[in-house]
Every structure is written in structure tokens, then in C-alpha cells.
Image (cartoon, rainbow, N blue to C red):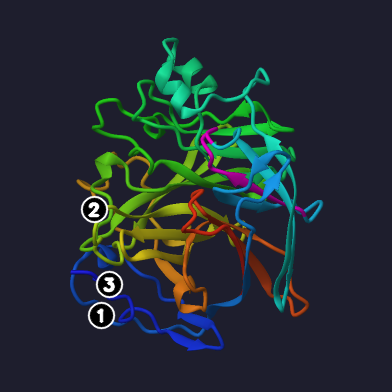
Amino acid sequence: MAGPLCNYAAMINTTLRHRTITFGAAGLLASALLAAGPLAAAPAAADTTEARLLGYRDLDRGLKVDSTTVGGLSGIDRDPRTGEYLMISDDRSTVGPARYYTADIDVRASGVEDVKITSATELTKPDGGAYPSYKQSIDSPCTGPQRACDRDGAVDPEELRVDPVTKKVWWSTEGTNKSPTVLNPALRASSKGRTVQELPLPRDFRFDRAERRGPRGNLSLEAFAFTDKGKRIVTALEGPMIQDGPAPTPEKGALTRISEHTRSGEIAAQYAYPLDPVFAAPKDQPYMDNGVPAILPVDDKGRYLVLERAYSDGNGYRIRIYEVDTAKAQDVRRIDSLATEPPTRPLRKELVADLGQMGVDPVYNAEGMTWGPRLPNGDRTLVMVVDDNFSAEEKSQVIALTVSS
């Protein structure tokens, strides 16, 4: 049966006024989110986080910048030194080379006044060569050591961030477990597009050829950001690891993992994050998902905004932003399987924004978010980017919200 199958309203004190949605500080427990059936009401707290839509702007379809087609925009960050925005394309070197764009985005209290994409920067291998396309990786699979295949193989760029310490541009590639050559997820630093460094990731972030554990294909590492003034890197797996249970369905959510890494890649802390159930059963094709494409620190004390992007065939997208606080959550880095050993204190999440309830119509594939400039009244702006999937039926967009607490 199509339609939402989860009852969030019973747990959240929600008011809609002038496109502002206010949510109580009482969080959502993972155990409640993952259970089917009615949920008991939770009392609202005095302190609230408010989000309001400022506006959004469509980008011209087929826009060309530096001989590349603008599209597939899946991640965004603002360079605080220049005020410029960087937006990465998830093009797998098919429409054009792996790349990111630089843009001037004028966000004001009146909305998104203008978006000017000023340049494209190609992402290249450590030797300066172009990354191959996925077709090239299939036609000529890598036969060398796995480390070399990962370094020089095709990439699936998803997110980027400006390093507050080194000022280099870091980006994530989700990898693939489906081509003849398995290519693992990675976090890489670039200087003028050229890869100069890679963060060592834990073994569990690599694909298991037998698919008994580790990340799922196309649900691995997308989201990351710098926190604690650049001393740590936070990552979120888009979906649950295989050993942590099935991916979300309309009947049931799932647990994925948010990790805080040191600059050397070691996991300093890890938390179980409860993904919502998929909001509706698919209609024609059996395709549906809900996952985390972006995460953003609210402060340097363990509070984060988490973007959940859900899709259901025939029903479209639902985009929600939640706030979590790691202060009272259980560290699960030593738990092998969240399915066999459920955490007693998963992250509690508080709904901050639901784009479909705020005036964005229709809702497309929003995948990236970053903090923009503060407004004259002191409120923060949140700037989001929408991936058109290089489809004539979808759009590239920039969306701006204002967030206050």
C-alpha cells in the first residue's frame, strides 16, 4: 500500500507557520523509529530549533562551464576565506571528467538572489592523470594490487569539504562492488584538483567481495565534514552495513553508523544513527531507499545536522534534516553487529526541516548542505544543492533555509 507507513507526528510537537517548522528538543529513539505501529507522544521542550525556507533557484538545464555540463551536483561547501561555494558533481567520468565547480551564490533574507557558476576543476589521480570512467573500468579491469586499483580506478564523487587546517579540498568517492574490479570507498585531499593525500579508513569501510559484512554497494561512504576546528573528521555511511541489518523498507527503518575520526583516520567514537523507514511503498519499479548523503556540524561539541534523502518509485523524494547530539549516545565502535547487539543508547534525533512541508514543490534529489552567511538578525543560513541525476525529468537547484535556536 502506497503512503507513509510511519507515525512521526505522535512523537514530535510540530507547528507550521510562515513556512517555519518548530520541533521539540525531545529526540526520537531508534527503538521507536525501527518499530512498526503507533508511537507514544513525547513532550516538547522549551528550547527549539527552527528552520524556515528562504527560497530556491533552478539552474539552467544543460549549462556549460569550462566545456563541461553542469549536473549531478551532490555536495556543497562554502570556503569561509573567500565566501565562494564549491559543488561536486557525481558524474562518474561519463558525461565529463570527475570535477567540482566554484560558484558565487547570493543568499539573503529575501531568498536565493543569484547563482553564478564561475569555473570547473577536474579531479585527477596522484600522477595528474584523468580518472577512467566506469565503462573503462569494466572493459579493462584492474589486475594489480587492490591498493593500486583503488588509487587509479574509476571514482564516484559524492561530497567535498574545504579543510580548515590545510585549506585543501577533500572529497569522497563511494566506490563500487559491482564492476569486475571492486573499488573501495575513499576520502581524498586535492590541491587544484590533483589528489595529494588519502585518509586511511578502517577495514570495515571496505567492500567484502562475499558481501557478508561491510558497506553495501551504492550505500557506502558519501557524507563527511570537518569538526572540532579541523581536528576531527566526521563520516556517515549512507546506509546500514551488511552485518547491521537490512536497508530501510516502508515497514521498518535501519541503523547506520556515524563515526568521528582522528586526522590519521582512526575512529575515535562511533554512534548508531536511526534511519527512517521509506515513506511510501514503490509503485511500478521495486526501487526505494532512504539514506544519509550529507552531515554538517552544528558546533564543535558533537551536535550535527543529518540529511536524510528518501526515494520511492512513483512517489518521488522526501528530504528531511535532523539534528543529533552525541553527548549521551553510546559509542558502538566495538560492536560488530548492531543487528545482533542492538545499542542501548542510539542517537536521538530531532526533526529540523522537511522540505516538502516548507514550500519546496516539487521536491527533488537534495544531497548536499553547508552553512552559508549569517543574516543581519544573526540567524544562520543553510545552503543546499540538488542533484538532477543528469535527467531531463529532474532539476539542479540551490535551496536556502534559515536556522535559529
Circles 2, 1 touching at the beta carbon (< 8 Å): no
Relative to 343, say whether 25 is above or below: below
Residue that label 3 marks: 4
Considering every residue shown, the one lying at the far top of the view is: 144
Dividing the image into 4 quarters, which one contains the C terminus? bottom right
Instruction: Please name the amino acid that badge 3 sits on.
Output: Pro
Name the element at disc 2. loop
Q: CA distance from mark 2 to mark 1?
A: 31 Å
Quadrant in the picture for residue 314: bottom left
Name the element at disc 1. loop
Q: Which residues are magenta?
A: 84-94
> For residue 15: magenta?
no
Q: Residues within 10 Å of mark 3 (few under 14, many from 20)?
A: some
Residue closest to the eye, 267 or 137: 137
Circles 2, 3 touching at the beta carbon (< 8 Å): no
Residue that label 1 marks: 40
> For residue 88: magenta?
yes
Q: Position of residue 165 (x, y in %)?
A: 73, 41
Q: Kindly identify which numbered label has been placed on residue 286.
A: 2
Residue closest to the eye, 49 or 389: 389
Name the element at disc 3. loop
